[in-house]
Image: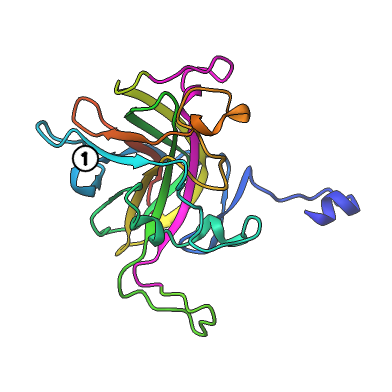
Amino acid sequence: FLKHFLKDDPKLDLPEAYVFETGTAQWRRYESWPPKNTREQTLYLHSDGKLSFDSPADGTSQFDEYMSDPAKPVPFIPNVAIGMTREHMLDDQRFACSRPDVLVYQTEVLEEDITIAGPITASLQVSTTGTDSDWVVKLIDVYSGDYPNPDPNPAGVQMGGYQQLVRGEAFRGKFRNSFSKPEPFEPGKMTKVEWVLPDAYHTFRRGHRIMAQVQSSWFPLVDRNPQTFCDIYHAREEDFQKATQRVYHSSRAGSQVRVLVLAPAK
């Protein structure tokens, strides 16, 4: 690369995509991105915190809910930091699992490796008692409970059950239909909110689980939403209101995360 662009070497043996595969720590070459041998698969949110490639059955629980309080936003890391830490994009998310304002869904233990390559789409059926709301989806790799700690381990990281952030993205709900014409939510009305997370190239290893977390704040990566429909930059103190958020996952109104799964190498 440097010889070609800095020293005029005509040879440049680079593919269309030369990407690092997290989960296996390998560099891979592809002639297109996303790779041609991917297939979109859907992870469905179920009742009882279940995440599955199978769609919800009829008669299952209709929704999960939580209270979102702008005065107590979900932080992006568990500790106090100045600025954005380098590690936050793969940090342990166990701290968020214990919060009542975070919904958690996870698969059964994987029986084989699953590699995703490309964009991730979050599609939620939601309602809020407010008139505006943020929605955050995080896709997480849950390590096995007996996963060994690094040696040496100066930071004291406990890798057993580690919840590694793979990708996360927030979406401001009032822009769900148009970025130029924001719309309020009708309180209590089920509404579809769909957005695309950044591309990922990651392998969830056999023995791990895939997790999705849903929340309505991610502070201070994303500024607080008052949860009332207003110009946030001029929001008054009284505009910041608690709201009850519902995420629906019935067979007729399902919430899901769509990923591009790479076919196993033959």
Can residue 77 be seen from the camera position used here?
Answer: yes
Residue situated furthest bottom in the rendering: 152
Q: Is residue 158 left or right of residue 63?
A: right
Residue sitting nearer the eye, 67 or 41 = 67
Query: Which residue is denoted by mark 1 in the rendering?
Result: 54
Foreground: 108 or 99? Answer: 99
Q: Is residue 106 magenta?
A: no
Amino acid type, residue under disc 1 in the picture: Asp
In the image, which residues are magenta?
159-185
Residue 232: x percent and y percent? 58, 29
Left or right of residue 49: residue 84: right
Vertically, is 22 above or below 193? below
Q: Residue furthest front?
A: 238
- Which quarter shows the C terminus? bottom left
Is 74 situated left or right of 1 in this image?
Answer: left
Please state the horizontal and vertical placement of residue 42, each as a whole percent of the image: 32, 37
- What's the residue at 49%, 84% (across, down)? 151
Is 124 in front, or is 235? Answer: 235
Q: Secondary structure at mark 1?
A: loop
Establish if 241 lies above or below 113. Answer: above
Q: Is residue 160 magenta?
A: yes
Residue lying farthest top? Answer: 181
Residue 223 is situated, as x and y percent measured from the top left of the image, at 57, 40
Residue 21 visible to the viewer: no
